[in-house]
Amino acid sequence: MTFNGVAQIVIFFLIVLALAKPVGIFLSRVFNGHRTFLHPPLRWLEALCYRLGGVDPEQEQRWTQYAISLLAFSAVSFLFVYAIQRLQGFLPLNPQHFGGKQVSPDLAFNTAISFVTNTNWQSYAGETTLSYFVQMAALTVQNFVSAAAGVAMSVALIRGFARRESKTIGNFWADLTRATVYVFLPLSLLGALFLCSQGVIQTLRPNLPVRTVQGATQVIPGGPVASQEAIKMAGTNGGGFFNANSAHPFENPTPLTDYVEMLFIFVIPAGLAYMFGREVGDTRQGWALFAAMSALFLAGAFFCYHFEQRGNPLLARMGIATQATAGQPGGNMEGKEVRFGITDSALFATVTTDASCGAVNSMHDSFTPLGGMVPLVNMLTGEVIFGGVGAGLKGMLLFAILAVFIAGLMVGRTPEYVGKKIEQKEVKLAMVALIAAAASILVFTALSSVLRFPAHGYWNPPGPTAANVANPGPHGFSEILYAYASTTGNNGSAFAGLNTNTPWYNLTLGLAMFIGRFIFLLPLLGIAGSLAAKKRLAVTSGTFPTHGPLFVSLLIGTVILVAALTFFPALSLGPIAEHYLLFSRHAMAAVKP
Amino acid sequence: MRYLSPAFRFVLLFTVLTGIIYPLAVTGLCQWWFPHQADGSLVRAKGRIVGSALLGQTFTGAAFFHPRPSAAGKGYDPMASGGSNLGPTNPMLLARVKAAVARFRRDNPAFRGPIPSDLLTASGSGLDPDISPASAYAQAPRVAKARGLSLILVRHLIGQTTQPRQLGFLGEPRVDVLRLNLALARLAPAGPATAPRSRPAM
């Protein structure tokens, strides 16, 4: 680790810390319908949305109605995205003349689910598959609204804790509109302009072939990239315009854009944690969640940074430098960009998987085994570390419920959290969510490790599903595990060597995304509804305080324990086995000339 | 129906707002305020476009600075951006780097010591425009000899082209290979034969 590297990580964290409170207050005002500095210029747009949408924002919904609204909205979105992709050949803004040949039905299904669930897993390469119209009218739209729907669900859950003896948890359409109009649109507009000023392209011209200095032909791509890039980060979506995602110089041209993109990922989730405390009437509760998230974030970032900076011993033996010097970054640079070096690549990998973003500025597949295990573990724990707008705070609250439940078992009292009694129903629903996610990851990974289809058949042309991996040995298993962890966690990043554009992978990964979004999140809305109906208990001397270091430690312990018990066997078959392989004499001998 | 009607209306509404109005508005503003960047930071030399300042391109031969190996298509193909995705224990990675090391040592006999970590590893995008300053200095003797320039001059040129950490602490110091080679060509326009002596790494 270098001084500069540590400084970059620490300064990044301090900025997030400084932003949490102002952003939290802003979010809290927006979702309570209070006036903010953005209301004068944008109030008319919000009102217009309600009028055109034909809804009354004041009409409160029960959790079931809220959930059905969400499902209906997602279902219609899915149909739209599917149809626009399949019909791209007949639609405008298609200078490269892409058609249905590029987008098979199973790929369109996968991509539609992927963007509607805020996962943005991509089995395709954007630059050679989708027209500008699809990127804008289908994908950019879902970047906005799937994020807005994710924030809406977080807000609904917060209301569950904050309200007392209430049958309702807010209005989905109002939350969706407010998140889009006051949060994501202004933030994306500013972000897009900033990114473009640094070099992110924003043009509707077709790809431009040029002759390079040495006379070869190179095609300079075009596209409305900046507008999509900004919401891709702010909405923790992560689906790249180009195949290389945020490693592509046209998506992420400078270290400053990189830093800003990472801040975009964390700013709203960090604000939501503060908003939680504010809404339940005790900001310390929000800071307690924030503290647990921060500890896990910093641990992951430095762990990943350490192993990436240590580099690959097998390359070091061949004479590649691994020590950083003033003139070169050292470490494991395979799959990383020079402008980001080791630090920003490791930090980005941690941030994008702490949140459910999934954008990448380096290829995680080429990370060292333990460096690459950090993003994997972040996703396996449910992306609860700040968490992104798609799933984050909700997952952490779920672990908070489990933590107080465990504490309650230890002392033999009915557990309480922020004044709400946690009873059988809440714990059951929380377990449904956790088990659904774990089962989706482990069952699909197991199936894809052993299934055999006929070669050149429909389901998986390479034959055995394990044959789709790009790397032999334990690393190949890590690729499969990472794919299902990423899709179930609605993250979208990948160990990208795995070829997933076959019907088997497109369909099962699509199912995993569905489970991760709806089977994981609907129980949480159920918890919100159930909690909202409860009385608030007075704090007594017997109440377990949930704002101190003891609770924070318990919460961190619960997160780690649940992940460890569920996923340690799988991790030891993948990255951990590979780590020992990498450092063992056996591997050393294997590369001897 | 009570739910489907608003669902349809909101999807349509947001498609127009965030999928058409927003990107077109951003396009208009960016083309107005940052036309150079919005169009891809195109670089001209001798009156024609030779590439983008942000995208790497292939350079071969002793007289040019070489970029990093690229996994994008046949090398620096923006239509196939991406990394090698080879894991750290993959024999293909080890064989590729081993061959690249041998080639590098042969082409740069003046260079001693460990090879900078970025120079023979493939980038994430396959389009990395930069190499580290150390990677540029490592190639300087070869380029100076091939161009008939003094080593001091070439090293000075690298120093001038090096971009420091942004805002003093962000990212890594770096050298844009296209810019460096164009500056080199201006300095010694009719350099000696630049016929490729070896294929670029990878």
Image (cartoon, rainbow, N blue to C red):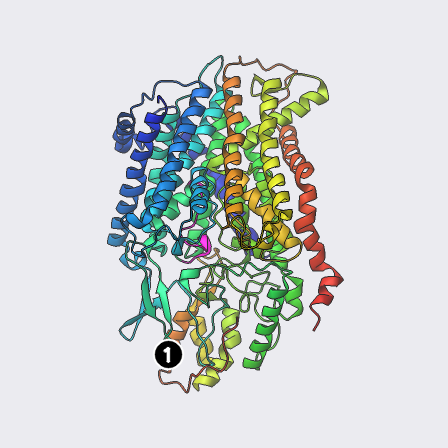
The residue lying at 46 percent from left, 20 percent from top is A64
- Residue type indicated by callout 1: Ala
Judge by depth and name the residue closer to the eye, A134 or A462: A462
Q: Chain of mark 1?
A: B
- Give coordinates of residue A171: x percent, y percent: 39, 22
From the viewer's perspective, tell me whether residue A265 is left or right of residue B16. Answer: right
Of helix, strand and loop, which mostly describes the magenta segment? loop
Which structural element holds mark 1?
A: helix
**Above-or-below relation of B174 to A123:** below
A437 horizontally vs A192: left or right: right
Q: Assess whether residue B56 is covered by the magenta stretch.
A: no
Residue A182 visible in the shown view? yes
Residue A140 seen in the figure: no
Farthest right residue? A585
Residue bearing mark 1: B185
Q: Dividing the image into 4 quarters, which one contains the C terminus of chain A?
A: bottom right
Does A500 sit above or below residue B149? above
- In reply to whether residue A242 is colored magenta, the answer given is yes
Judge from the rendering whether residue A314 lies leftward or rightward of residue B27; answer left or right. right
Q: Quadrant of residue A253?
A: bottom left
Residue occupying the point 52% across, 29% down: A286
Q: Quadrant of the N terminus of chain A?
A: bottom right
Question: Which range of residues does the magenta coloring cover?
Answer: A235-249
Residue A105: x %, y % from top left: 42, 45
Question: Image point 66% across, 50% down: which residue?
Answer: A574
Q: Residues within 10 Å of mark 1 (few under 14, many from 20)?
A: some
User: A61 or A127: nearer the eye?
Assistant: A127
Residue A555: percent from the left, percent from the top? Answer: 63, 31
